[in-house]
Image: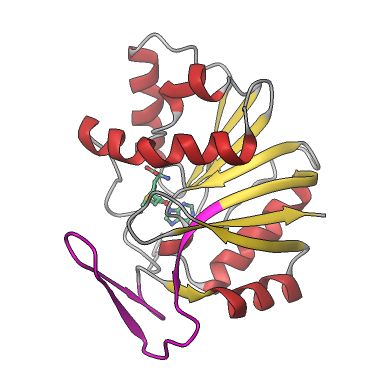
Amino acid sequence: MNYFENNYLENDRITNDEYKSRLTAFQIPAIIEHFQTLENKQFLDLGCGDIVLGEFQEILGRPIKYFVQDINKNPVDVGINRLKGKGIDTSNIFPLISPYFDLTKIKNQTLDCAFSNSLFSHLTLNSILICLNNLYPKMKRTAKYMSSMIIIPENHNEITYEWKVKYGAISHSARDPYHYKFNLFKKYVESTTSFEVVQNHAYGHPFQRLVEFKAF
Ligand SMILES: C[S@@+](CC[C@H](N)C(=O)[O-])C[C@H]1O[C@@H](n2cnc3c(N)ncnc32)[C@H](O)[C@@H]1O
């Protein structure tokens, strides 16, 4: 399949231990803050990569169903094998591999919570809307989707944005990594999906915010 939006289908996203510990240092507190616990919940990680959260189910709570979705099968397989190698029971993990968020294997209105780290930062608005429109029917009413993304200041009109962070980073309007202005993004999403875009929260990532989508 040709896929041009980002290069994650060509280049497997596999993390090493050092990277995993940096990623989980902000993902775990965010999940606890916004979902309290995943214990016995139906949880979906969209754009899960190699499932960095998988070995922290004792801290996060063990979901009764833990759906892991990604465009690329290999990192998901690597993640499941890593968890098995650590003696973790993976029988609650259900992989969903597809390029355009095919969530048909999840029953309608069953998800208690959904999460993404750095998925929307690699997606165009069109794909984000496909993702949200496929996700909405799967969420219980009032369930939340927390998704990190790159938000630039409202008054910024350039098509690229240079982030003053440790190793430097540039985000773009029309190229991966993609950035968005929050108020405009909220208008697009609320006028074309059934989600409310509640707010964007602080997140431990150097330049991403955690956006809260509420299903009605
Ligand atoms: C920056 S990585 C983050 C991975 C993981 N969430 C983590 O924190 O380690 C972005 C992930 O999104 C996935 N991805 C990119 N485009 C996608 C798409 N169209 N549908 C599903 N997953 C996608 C990539 O394969 C990759 O695993």
Residue 106 visible at all: no
Q: Is residue 118 visible?
A: yes
In terms of image quadrants, where is residue 199?
bottom right
x and y percentages locating residue 82 in the rendered image: 33, 22
Q: Position of residue 137 (x, y in %)?
A: 78, 51
Q: Residue at x 42, y 34 (%)?
A: 51
Residue 160 among those drawn in magenta = yes
13 is higher (above) or lower (below) than 210:
above
What coloring was used for the rendering? secondary structure
Give the residue drawn at x 47%, y 61%. Answer: 149
- Picture layout, residue 41 above or below residue 210: above
Q: Which residues are magenta?
A: 147-175
Q: Is residue 46 left or right of residue 55?
A: right
Q: Is 186 in front, or is 51?
A: 186
Q: Position of residue 94 (x, y in %)?
A: 57, 29
Find residue 104 and report its horizontal and vertical position in percent. Answer: 70, 45
Q: Residue at x 66, y 40 (%)?
A: 113
